[in-house]
Amino acid sequence: MVFRRVLVLLALLASAAACTLPNDPSQTAAGPSRAGIPALPRELERDVGSPYPDAALQAYVDRVGQKVVSQSTVAGNFRFIVLDEPLANAHAAGGYVMVTRGLLALLDDEAELAAALSHEVGHVVQRHAFQRARQRQSVLDAAVEAATSTGSITVGRSVARDGLLALRRYSREQELEADKIGVAMLAKAGYRGGAMASLIDKLRRQGQLELQLMGEAPDSIDRRSATSTHPAPVERRIALQGVNDATAPGESRRAAFLDAINGMSVDDPPQEGFVRGNRFLHPVLRLAFEAPRDFRLFNDTDGMLGVGRDRSLLFFSCTDGPAQGSLADWMRNRLKPTPTDIHTTEIGGAEAAIGARPRGSDTGLGQARYVLIRHGDRVCFFNLLSDGSDRDQRIEVLVSAARTFRSLSEAEAEALRPYRLRIVPTAGTTAARLAQRLPYTDYKMERLLLLNSVDNGAELLRLPQVKIIEP
């Protein structure tokens, strides 16, 4: 699996601190607020990201959320917040219910937004996070007790494994429960009950396209393993059959929703850099590089991860401060196990060092390389891994990709802008022309159809207005 190997790479080549959602974030100091932009508790913001800096959109989403809870029997105060994140996701912690702008871009109307918010409120009302934490602690306590009483660590691990599998099944049950609670809240607020099902369908289609982009079978989205913490989309749809209000009539408010998201960014925040096909460009740090053509790039706050079709991996990031001495010495003294074949070079006119992870230092891993580049007061680094049948040749391709690293000129950096969602009329155009306007190098039509929840161009043109993505 891709993610298992991603975790191996990150465990080997990068360090990260674990964050935990506070049980009651309302008791945690909030960060500074800006006019019309809600503030999140600092600990929560470190975990989920910052609010999107659009006061009008924040106010709109909060109004929808308040409408949902005010028409229900739910007690307590809630804040509904849009996160400045391009991936489709939603979170709930204490009185905070958060949706990413990536999820908003995927939705089709206000009823689906209300479905996403009510699902998360369902988690809060049922105290699912607290229950999972309590169950997890019980599993750990049982494992320690088993190991102590038997004198066998193996027995303790077996108890922990069985308990964690049961906990994952419990988490899946909680997701289905939140769906059903959300449907009831939708109906009471006057929205169409089918919005929960159509929300699930959209998430399924999004997952299918992501699998296609990675060269995986799209239908694997409907299969989950025993270790999955979420039910497969098909399970969620089946569970909604026969639920009261699941098909209840009600408002959609598509026009109001489209108006609210028109012009919204669908890109990474500029301070995290932009992915453009197989290129990564950072307007704030003023740097760029180009990954191999078959790579998909995934950007995050901690760095940029690239995954090749053969599951080769590339992780890129930069330090917060300078490295003292030569980069070769820094690599030799800081990385463990100490790299071999360390040599200095220049990349993009700057000092650089390249080293190899010692062969045999980790069973089951293939070729690994480290590339360090001095960039102003920072050190930027590539961690490269290839373990396919042609790993010796492939690792050299990855090193060549790292050598494309360069500094951006001030003019190049200023010219970089995030992609934005636009609402456009369909009159007088064709589906092919609309797809061509999308700033992607592949799957243009598939992306356009997904964005607008239709199966073909004819259905798309029957809509008076559609969503597109423009630079």
Image: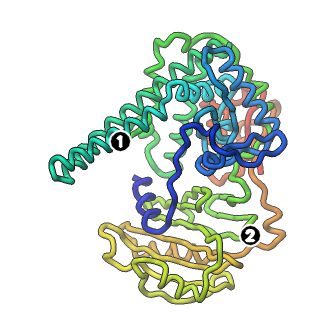
> What secondary structure is marked by label 1?
loop
Instruction: Name which residue lies at 47% across and 23% down.
Output: 177
Residue 172: give x, y in percent of width and height.
41, 31
Density class for disc 1 (Cα within 10 Å; few <14, some 14-19, many ≥20) is few
Instruction: Name which residue lies at 30% across and 69% down.
Output: 363
Q: Quadrant of residue 74?
A: top right
Q: What amino acid type should be assigned to the residue bearing mark 1?
A: Thr
Residue 110: give x, y in percent of width and height.
70, 25
Determine which of the numbered discs, if any, sits on residue 434 in the image: none
Instruction: Name which residue lies at 54% across and 43% down.
Output: 21
The residue at which mark 1 appears reads as 227
Residue 164: give x, y in percent of width and height.
33, 41
Determine which of the numbered discs, if any, sits on residue 286 in the image: 2
Q: What amino acid type should be assigned to the residue bearing mark 2?
A: Arg
- The residue lying furthest to the left in this view is 150
176 versus 346 height, above or below: above
Answer yes or no: is residue 433 visible. no
Q: Quadrant of residue 326?
A: bottom right
